[in-house]
Image (spheres, grey):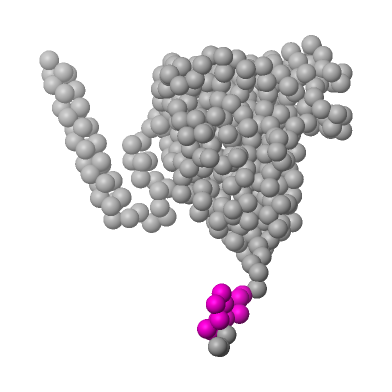
Amino acid sequence: MTVLEQPGTTGHTPPPAWQPRTDPAPLLPDAEPFRLLGTPDSDGLDAGLLRTLYRHLVRGRRYNRQATALTKQGRLAVYPSSTGQEACEVAAALALEERDWLFPSYRDTLAVVARGVDPVEALTLLRGDWHTGYDPVEHRVAPLSTPLATQLPHAVGLAHAARLRGDDVVALAMVGDGGTSEGDFHEALNFAAVWQAPVVFLVQNNGFAISVPLDKQTAAPSLAHKAVGYGMPGRLVDGNDAAAVHSVLSDAVRRARSGGGPTLVEAVTYRIDAHTNADDATRYRTDEQVEQWLRHDPVALVERELRGRGLLDDDAAKAVADDAEAMAADLRERMNADPVLDPMDLFAHVYAEPTPQLREQAEQLRAELDAEAETDGEHGREAGAR
């Protein structure tokens, strides 16, 4: 009997035992979100950083409230508030160097402002006045992205191109938990890991994709665990702890800048306000849930740390609050001015060379505007004749 005929044999030599290409253990996130404020590790936090975080958090909270009020007054078409998420917003902006790029989602206007963009310009898109409202190149801030997760591949492309050119640039892309259910999220993380692009992905897990809770989107242990499947490290952080978010993001930025590749950071936070002014959050969550998160307020956490270390007194806190009020008053006054808009700007800066479809649409709109102007002129002449 030959070997091929012997019972229980396969007749061929088995391949070597399969081994993973990389050890997945170092890529796994911690079991609990990383925290700094209120822990023994907070003693080593830089006092200047804490004061800077506090100032931006207070301004951010006031900015959110003022923008929400402007929406109710009809000065904004829509405003997705980031109240309760200010720690993520501020830390994302402060973790970057001036030469780096921020890729925000539609909810990240506060991060855009903390990056240095004029508060009015940051709201221009949400007012419906312009494509973006600010010059992306001036502050290295990409346009606010309303389509979910489309900014993520853009961030990867810019980061990869920068590395090919030899530019010392890192891209930080922000997305909500709902955006992780989009194909763009998968494509961005996959290419970022394959190319080892210098990009950091910050997922603000605020509990709901509009009205859909996280457990209806994914069965993963955490969103940070998704990083392992792409071959990058995942980090889990308390998204209301501004110092912890800043530390984790700063580490990820340094890793990306040194050639270590991308990192996925999940910041566990909560959306205190409704999804937008058009949403009724009471239909899918309870007041008790909101109240629990209010007791873990990101502004209060930093203030408690500062006061506990003798780095903040009532006079200093009032000065910070007064500065925030001045910002809100300026924003209110400037947003109350009606801008002079040219409808033809709809077709400006869409493509470097307008497509035939854009040219056709522009000609159609121009004809409609000319006809409307002629009609208004005729009515004016008739009124004058009477």
Residue 195 image point, x, y percent? 60, 62
State left or right for residue 268 relative to residue 153.
Answer: right
Quadrant of the frame with the N terminus: bottom right
Does the magenta portion include 11? Answer: yes
Q: Nearer the viewer, residue 314 or 35?
A: 35
Q: Residue at x 55, y 58 (%)?
A: 191
Magenta-highlighted residues: 4-15
Residue 380 image point, x, y percent? 19, 23
Instruction: Say if 307 sits above or below 23 in the image.
Output: above
Does the magenta portion include 162? Answer: no
Q: Nearer the viewer, residue 252 or 25?
A: 25
Quadrant of the frame with the C terminus: top left
Instruction: Say if 285 sits above or below 349 in the image.
Output: above
Q: Examine the residues drawn in magenta and state their main secondary structure.
A: loop
Q: Quadrant of residue 352?
A: bottom left
Q: Quadrant of residue 313?
A: top right
Q: Nearer the viewer, residue 343 or 165?
A: 165
Residue 194 image point, x, y percent? 59, 61
Q: Residue at x 45, y 27 (%)?
A: 211
Q: Does residue 94 appear anywhere in the picture?
A: no
Q: How many marks?
A: 0
Q: Does residue 192 appear anywhere in the picture?
A: yes
Residue 3 image point, x, y percent? 57, 85
Residue at the outermost bottom position: 2
Q: Nearer the viewer, residue 17 or 94?
A: 17
Q: Residue at x 79, y 16 (%)?
A: 316
Q: Residue at x 74, y 49 (%)?
A: 254
